[in-house]
Amino acid sequence: MATRVLESRFEHLSVNDENEPADGAKYQKSKMITTTVSSSTQLSQNASRANLLKIALQNQNTTSTIVSVPSRTSQWRASRTLNGSGSPPMKGHSVGGAEIEEVAHERKSMYEQPAPKVFHLGMFEIGRPLGKGKFGRVYLAKERSSGYVCALKVLHKNELKHGDAEKQVRREIEIQSNLRHPNILRLFGHFHDSKRIFLILEFAGKGELYKHLRRENRFPEWKSAQYVAQMAAALKYCHKKHIMHRDIKPENILLGIHGEIKLSDFGWSVHAPSNRRNTLCGTLDYLPPEMLKPGRDKNTYTNKVDLWSLGVLTYEFLVGEAPFEDTPVMTQRKIERGEMTVPSFVSPEARDLIKKLLVIDPEKRISLDEVQEHPWIIKYCVKGERAAQRESKSTGSRYSDE
Ligand code: AMP
C-alpha cells in the first residue's frame, strides 16, 4: 500500500529528463527503499560513497551543464579528494575561498562548450519523503550503480521564480558543493530538467536538530557543549574560506547517523573575501545587533555575525527557547540592547560562554578559537576526546612495531 502511494507520488517526476544520456538508462518506477542505515552498512556505504564522489567530482569538474574539460586545478582537486594525498599542481595554490572564485572563473571561460551529462534522475531509486521545505521536497534516494544512499532535494523552478529564490539556490549550490567538513552537509552535485532542479545531498540519518530539541525540550549540558563545539568547528572551516553562513538556527542543522552536527541551508550564506557585507537577511531571533541597527560602519558586518547566532543557539540548546523571543518589535529592541536573562539552572561556565558570544560590539565578541578553548567546551568535549586519544595511543603502542 505504502509502495503504491509512493509510486503514484512519483508518477509526476517526468521520465524525459534533459540530462538523461542518449543511450537511455530509462527511469524506472521507484520502489520503496529499505533504508535504515545501520553501522553495519557503513562500510559498503563508504565504498559506494567513493563511487558517488567520483561521479560528483566528474560532475563538479565538468559542472554538469557548462564546463566540459577538467582543468589542472580541478583534476588535482579530484585526486586530492579521492585518495586524500594529492598535492597542488602549482606551488602556492590557495585552497581557500579563492578556489570558489577560480571555479566560477573556469565555468565562465568554458561557457557554452558541449554539456557532459553526468547526473540524471534515472540514476536514482527514489524512496520515502524526508521532509518538505519552502520550495520543494526532499526524498531518500539510492544511486543505482553505487548503491549509495543520499537525499535528493527537488526544487520546482517556477516556485523558485515566484519566490524570488533563484539567486539563493544558485548561491547554495555554488558554496555548499565546495565545502568538505564532517560537520557540514555535503552537496555532491545537481542536475535539472525543464521544470525542476535536483540537489544530491548527503543523507542526514537523524534528521532535523530542531525536532530533537522540541522533543527533548532542552538539551543537557554535555550534549549542548558537544553540539556547540561541532558548530564552532564547522564555522571555523567556513570562515577560513571567507564564507559567512548568516542563517544559523536549529532548523538549518541536521544530524548525521551518529548524531553529529551537519550544518546545512547555505541559501543565505555568502562568499565575502573582504569579510564585510551589508545585506539584511536571516531570521530575526538569531540576527545580531549590527545587522539590525546601522552603526558607524554603514550597516556593514563581518563573520562575527555567526558568533552572535552561535550564542543564541547555545542559549536555545540549554534553555529550550531563544533568548530574545518576543513580538518582532520587542525582539528587535531586546537584541539591540542585548537584553536577556540566563535561567539559574544553566551552569556558570555555560552562562559565561553565552555572555561572551552575545556581546553587542562584534569586535569584542569571543572568537571561534576562544570558543573551542572555553572551559565549558573543554569540560565536555576536549577532555573526553583527549582521554579517548590517550586510550587509543596506549593501545596502539602495545601493538606497534616500535
Ligand atoms: P529543506 O528544504 O532543506 O528545508 O528540507 C526540508 C526537510 O527535509 C528538512 O526539514 C529535513 O527534515 C529534511 N531534509 C532535508 N535535507 C535532508 C538530508 N540531507 N537528510 C535528511 N533529511 C533532510
Image (cartoon, rainbow, N blue to C red):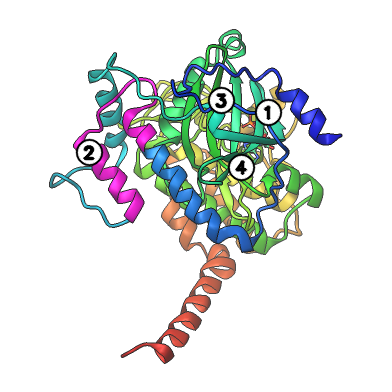
Mark 2 crowdedness (10 Å alpha carbons): few <14, some 14-19, many ≥20: some
- Regarding ligand 1, which quadrant of the image does it lie in? top right
Whether residues under marks 3 and 2 lie with C-beta atoms below 8 angstroms apart, the answer is no
Q: Earlier in the sequence, mark 4 or mark 2?
A: 2
Residue 337 in picture, x, y percent from top left: 60, 34
**Residue type for callout 3:** Lys
Q: Which residues are magenta?
A: 58-83
Looking at the image, residue 264 sits to the left or right of residue 86; the answer is right
On the rendered image, what quadrant is the C terminus found in? bottom left
Q: How far, Cα to Cα, is label 2 from label 1?
A: 39 Å
At mark 3, the secondary structure is loop
Mark 2 highlights which residue?
A: 73
Mark 2 residue's CB less than 8 Å from ligand 1: no
Tell me where residue 300 appears, x and y as whole percent: 41, 25
Q: Of label 3 and label 2, which has the lower sequence position?
A: 3
Task: Identify which residue is drawn at 22% across, 19% down.
Answer: 109
